[in-house]
Image (cartoon, rainbow, N blue to C red):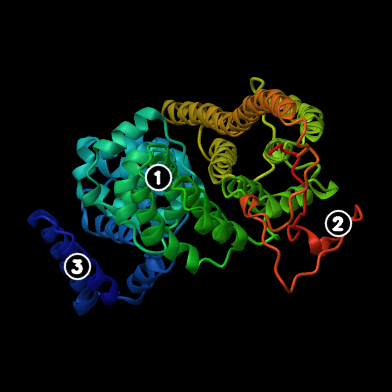
């Protein structure tokens, strides 16, 4: 008991308590001394009562230590609040929350502050995270945000702030974000974490927070995705490279998840491609293992790189692999476009027309699927991983569970809880909208890819018609010298990027691609271009 007393006094002095609060602790000390040390007042029955009174109390965080101090030292504390505090100190949080309404309505005005803040603590401990955060944000911007009680609560919840935000995927309105932006992040780890959470989809403000996050922070990878995309859009490739090398790479290397590493290589490949460092980009594309979903997308992007390098040999081998039935259900709208570009470069005009037809047939299904996914209030699951969709879905699921739980724990007819329930229902509606927005973003991106592919295919068609006309003109000029459209270029022609090695064996393709041959094929070919 003296040990508990010592803890109480240390806590009171360290938390910057006022002289009045010190006198409360002194009164408590005098009380205990009188009860234990004065022989004429001591009896076994009194001691037994005191021991039993404290036997169920468990003080395992700073807020409960503060509450214990108030409970034992405030002589004027109303009996119903004492009982309420005791149930909290005994970790009977559900019972305490049920009694909150009665406490708030009957408590004297001087105790309104601590009862309001203690109510937030109960919400936090019971996992009613969104309701807690909305209440916390409301008090944080009020004069109560500077009180000792609120600061103690803030310090308590800050210990697991990063995991708490990530696991609960707190839903924020635009007004919430504005309020958070005005709070002083240097005063509290919980506030600074809320600022980072609010910036997960904001590349401009996210960059400053990203640079300040410690190694191993859960928000680094999702926030860096937003920041790097924003930098790439504005052609700030040097800054994007700095973020990748100095912030993202250490996190990726410490991760044991092959998908995290694959997404990192894919992002590096894209940035290097944009910077026209084609050889370096190809190196990272080839590092992505075939066991992850990003593998197919990486091979398609690498095919464009091979076109830039004019490496027809490897390009046509890649496309032959992508054209197998193994990938028939994959979103590959550019596959037949790539074939058309390759055949056009070789003046294989009949094959280009064949590619046009295949393009239309293959993408009809995807056009229908994308249009259906973009209908109002339709949520079609994505076929690739998207971290933001997953976070919003998790938050949405948590909100629905919280609403059900809150209704079972509180008096829903109480005006106080009616307001909380209305706020929670409003957040559920907002969360539904946010999830829908993320799905729309995902499928709208696919629509844009399809539209751009169609536009590029039209350019190929125009270019083919132009080349056909030029070929006819050239043929008329060279009637006597039939360097015909059937001219065969050897596989060592440097213009086409083909290099036949001395120790290399080549076999004719028999129409079957074995699994171990996928993405390891090279192609001999002929050009039909008139010289």
Confirm whether residue 126 shows in the render: no
Is label 2 in a helix, a strand or a loop? loop
Residue 227: which disc? 1
Rendered residue at 29%/71% (across/down): 4
**Disc nearest the viewer among 3 and 1:** 1
**Mark 2 — residue?**
513
Confirm whether residue 172 shows in the render: yes
Of residues 150 and 265, the one drawn nearer to the viewer in this rendering? 265
Which of the 4 image quadrants contains residue 353?
top right
Of residues 261 and 326, the one drawn nearer to the viewer in this rendering? 326
Point out residue 398 in the picture as x, y percentages from the top left corner: 56, 42
Point out residue 76 in the picture as x, y percentages from the top left corner: 21, 48
Which of the 4 image quadrants contains residue 484?
top right
Of residues 193 and 114, the one drawn nearer to the viewer in this rendering? 193
Seen as rendered, the residue at the extreme left is: 19
| Quadrant of the snapshot with the N terminus | bottom left
Query: Would you say 129 lies left or right of 522 here?
Result: left
**Disc nearest the viewer among 3 and 2:** 2
Is label 3 in a helix, a strand or a loop? helix
**Mark 3 — residue?**
9
Q: CA distance from mark 3 to mark 2?
A: 78 Å
Point out residue 405 in the picture as x, y percentages from the top left corner: 57, 41
Relative height, residue 29 to residue 374 (above, below): below
Query: Would you say 308 lies left or right of 378 here?
Result: left
Is label 1 in a helix, a strand or a loop? helix
């Amino acid at each position: 008991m003296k040990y508990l007393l010592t803890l109480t006094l240390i806590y009171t002095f360290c938390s910057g308590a006022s002289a009045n609060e010190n006198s409360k602790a002194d009164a408590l000390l005098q009380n205990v001394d009188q009860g234990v040390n004065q022989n004429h007042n001591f009896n076994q029955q009194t001691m037994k009562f005191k021991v039993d009174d404290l036997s169920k109390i468990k003080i395992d965080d700073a807020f409960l230590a503060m509450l214990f101090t108030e409970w034992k030292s405030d002589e004027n504390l109303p009996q119903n609040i004492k009982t309420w505090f005791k149930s909290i100190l005994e970790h009977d949080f559900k019972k305490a929350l049920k009694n909150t309404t009665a406490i708030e309505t009957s408590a004297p005005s001087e105790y309104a502050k601590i009862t309001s803040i203690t109510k937030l603590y109960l919400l936090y401990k019971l996992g009613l995270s969104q309701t807690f955060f909305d209440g916390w944000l409301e008090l944080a911007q009020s004069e109560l945000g500077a009180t000792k009680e609120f600061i103690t609560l803030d310090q308590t919840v800050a210990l697991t702030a990063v995991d708490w935000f990530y696991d609960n995927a707190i839903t924020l309105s635009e007004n919430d974000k504005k309020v958070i932006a005005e709070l002083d992040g240097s005063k509290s780890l919980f506030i600074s974490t809320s600022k980072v959470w609010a910036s997960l989809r904001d590349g401009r403000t996210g960059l400053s927070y990203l640079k300040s996050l410690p190694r191993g922070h859960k928000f680094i990878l999702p926030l860096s995705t937003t920041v790097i995309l924003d930098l790439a859009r504005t052609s700030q490739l040097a800054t994007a490279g700095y973020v990748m090398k100095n912030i993202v790479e250490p996190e990726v290397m410490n991760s044991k998840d092959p998908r995290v590493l694959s997404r990192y290589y894919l992002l590096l490949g894209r940035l290097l491609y944009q910077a026209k460092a084609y050889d370096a980009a190809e190196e990272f594309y080839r590092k992505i293992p075939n066991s992850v979903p990003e593998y197919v997308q990486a091979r398609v992007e690498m095919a464009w790189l091979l076109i830039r390098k004019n490496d027809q040999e490897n390009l046509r081998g890649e496309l032959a692999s992508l054209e197998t039935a193994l990938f028939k259900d994959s979103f590959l709208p550019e596959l037949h476009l790539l074939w058309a570009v390759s055949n056009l470069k070789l003046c294989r005009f009949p094959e280009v027309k064949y590619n046009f037809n295949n393009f239309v047939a293959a993408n009809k299904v995807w056009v229908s699927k994308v249009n259906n996914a973009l209908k109002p209030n339709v949520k079609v699951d994505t076929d690739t991983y998207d971290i933001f969709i997953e976070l919003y879905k998790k938050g949405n699921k948590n909100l629905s569970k919280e609403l059900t739980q809150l209704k079972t724990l509180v008096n829903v007819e109480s005006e106080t809880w009616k307001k909380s329930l209305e706020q929670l229902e409003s957040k559920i509606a907002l969360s539904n909208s946010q999830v829908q927005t993320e799905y729309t973003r995902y499928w709208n991106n696919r629509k844009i890819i399809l539209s751009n592919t169609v536009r590029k295919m039209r350019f190929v068609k125009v270019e083919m018609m132009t080349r056909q006309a030029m070929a006819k003109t050239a043929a008329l000029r060279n009637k006597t010298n039939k360097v015909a459209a059937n001219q065969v270029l050897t596989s060592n022609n440097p213009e086409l990027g083909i290099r036949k090695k001395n120790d290399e064996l080549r076999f004719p393709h028999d129409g079957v691609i074995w699994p171990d041959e996928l993405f390891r094929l090279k192609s001999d070919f002929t050009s039909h271009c008139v010289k």
